[in-house]
Image (tube, grey):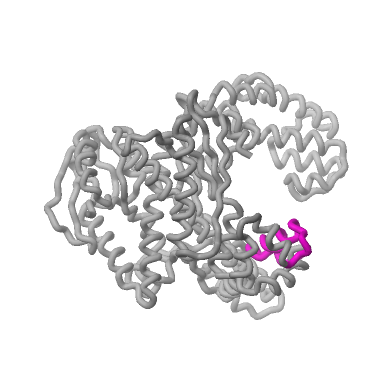
Amino acid sequence: MYLLLAPHQDGAAIQRVSPAGKATADARVVTGSELAAVVLDLESQRPRWVWERTQDWYPGLLKQGVEVERCHDLTLCGAILAHSSFTADKQYARSAAKITHDDDTVPPRALQPPPVPALQDALFEELPQPKGMGLDDLRAEFAAQQEAVSLVTGDDRCRQRLQLLLAAESAAAIVAAEMQHAGVPWREDLHEQILNEVLGPRPPLGQRPPALETLCRELRSILDSPALNPDSPQDLMRALHRNGIEVKSTRQWELKESRHPAIPPLLAYKKLSRLHTANGWAWLDAWVHSGRFHPEYVVGGVVSGRWASRGGGALQIPRNIRAAVHADPGHKLIVADASQLEPRVLVALAQDTKMAAAARDKDLYAGIAAQGFGGDRSKAKVALLGAIYGATTGESGRLMPQLARTYPRAVGYVEQAARDGEAGLTVTTRLGRSSPPPSPGWLRSQQSTTAEEQRRADNLARSRGRFTRNFVVQGSAAEWAACWLAELRRRLRTLRAEGSPSGELVFFLHDEVMVHAPDNAVEACIAAIEEAAHAAKELLFGRIPVEFPVSVAVVDSYDKAK
C-alpha cells in the first residue's frame, strides 16, 4: 500500500494510491497535532509512505515517538532516474534538469545538499504549512517515476535492480533521519579533557588556546614577523617568502619539503589549529547536547551515491577525539566495517573467478600477492587500488601490466569504464545509478584544434576517465552499503518487535556502521550485522563465490575499535 503525505493548508494531506500512482481513495486532511497519531495508526497496515523529502516529515515524527517502516523519497529517487542509463530514453529523464559541473578542469564530485526543510522543528505545531509539493504535484511526480521504472526495456533484471536501488536509497534516508535523531553517544567531559591536554585550558572568546599561542610566538620569532597571523594564508605566505621558503601553498606535503626551522612548529600549529576549529569547544557547544552528537546526514550527497553531511563533520570524526565517542553505562559500541569493500565489489562486478578465488577465506591483497606478485602484499594492494582509482604512473603504473595479465576481467572492467569516460559517455553502477554527463565546457574542449588546446583536452579526458573508472566501483559499493544498512535496520527492528534485546544504529561512514547496544544484546546485534552483510551481497549480485566479510569490534569507546 502506498500512502502519499503532502503539506496542506490545514496541516497535512494523506492519500492512498496504486503502485502506478493513481488515487484509490479520497484524500484525508489532518491537523499538525493529529498527524503523529494518524501515522502511527496507519503503520499497522505496513504502508510505503511517499513524500517529497524524508527530512521534511520524518524528523518531526521521530520527535513524537513515531517510526515508519518504509518510504519512497521522491527527491532522492528522482535524482537517480534523471540520470540512470536504464531510463535515459524515457520521458521522465528527458524532461528532468540535469546535474552538470561548472568547473571543466575536474570531474563532478558532489551534489548540492537539499535545502533545509521548512519548519522542520515545528511540523506538529499550528504554524503555516511547510513549503513543498502539494498533493496533486506529489501524486503526479510519483506516477511519473513509477512509469519511468515500468518502461525500462531489455533485461528484466535492469528494472529489478533499479527498483532495488530506489528502495535502498529511500531506506537509507530513513536510517539517516533515525541516526540523526538518536545521536552518537558522546562524553562531553572526555572531549573537554582531550582538548585541555592537547590545547590547554579553554581560552576566552576570540583568543587562541595556550598551545597555539605558544607556537604562534615561536613562529613569529623564527620568521622575524612580530605581527604574523598564522591563521591567515596570505600573511603566512608573505612571511615564508621573506625568509626564503619558496612554497606555492601552505599545504602540509609542500611544507615538508623545506628544512627551514620554522616548518616543524608551523606543521604543529596547523595540526592543533584544525582540532581547535573543527572539533574544539565551539563545536562541542554547537553539536553535542545531552550526551549525544546529532549531525545531519545528506544521503546521496556525492554523485557516486556516497553520503555527505551538512554540519558537524559527522563523516570526519578525527582519531584524536574518538575516545569521546563512548557507550552509555551497561552498553557497548559495536563497530563493524566491510573489509576491502571496493576491491571485492570490483571482483563481483567483473565476475573475475580467479580474483574471487584469491579472496576466498583470506585477505584479498594477500591472495592476489600469492597468485601474481610473489607474495608481496604491499605490491598487490598498490596495483589493485591503482586500477580502481586510475593511478597509472609510478609504482602503480609499473605493476599494472602484471595485474592485467593475472586478472584480465577485473582490470578490463575498470579500463572500459575509463575509456567510456574519456569518450564523454556515462557509466552505470550495478543497480543503475549513472554518472552525470560531461558539461558543455568539457564537450567544447574535446573539439580543440591547436596543439596546446589538444593537450588540455587530453588531460581533461583522462581526468574524466579516472572519475568514471572509480565511479562504477565506488557507486556499486555505496549501493551494497545502503542495502547493508536497510537489512541491518530491519533485523534490529525485528528483534525489538519480538521483545528481544536490541541495539540502535547510531553512525555510518561509507563501509562502517556503529550500533549502540545493551550488553545483553551484543551477540544478537553482531549476528544481525553479519547476516545483513550477506543479504546485501545476494541482493546485489546473487549467489556468487565472492565473500563480503565484516570485521567487528565490541568496545566501550570508538578509539578502541581500530
Left or right, 21 with respect to 181, comes to: left
Give residue 359's position: percent from left, percent from top. 62, 60
Up the image or down, 82 lies above or below 30; here it is below
Q: Is residue 71 visible?
A: yes
Give residue 393's position: percent from left, percent from top. 75, 65
The residue sitting at 18% across, 51% down in the picture is 15
Left or right, 115 with respect to 438, comes to: left
Up the image or down, 271 lies above or below 453; here it is above
Give residue 261's position: percent from left, percent from top. 87, 36
Q: Is residue 394 visible?
A: no
Q: Is residue 248 magenta?
A: no
Main secondary structure along the magenta-highlighted residues: helix
Left or right, 207 with respect to 27, comes to: right
Q: Quadrant of the C terminus?
A: top right
Left or right, 560 with respect to 310, comes to: right
The residue sitting at 78% across, 41% down in the picture is 238
Give residue 305's position: percent from left, percent from top. 48, 56
The residue sitting at 55% across, 62% down in the picture is 546
The residue sitting at 39% across, 40% down in the picture is 178
Relative to the observer, which residue lies in front, 346 or 548? 548
Q: Quadrant of the N terminus?
A: bottom left
Count of numbered tags = 0
Residue with the most extreme left position: 26
Residue with the most extreme bottom position: 449
Relative to the observer, which residue lies in front, 127 or 160? 160
Relative to the observer, which residue lies in front, 293 or 238? 293
What segment carries the magenta color? 372-393
Q: Is residue 379 magenta?
A: yes
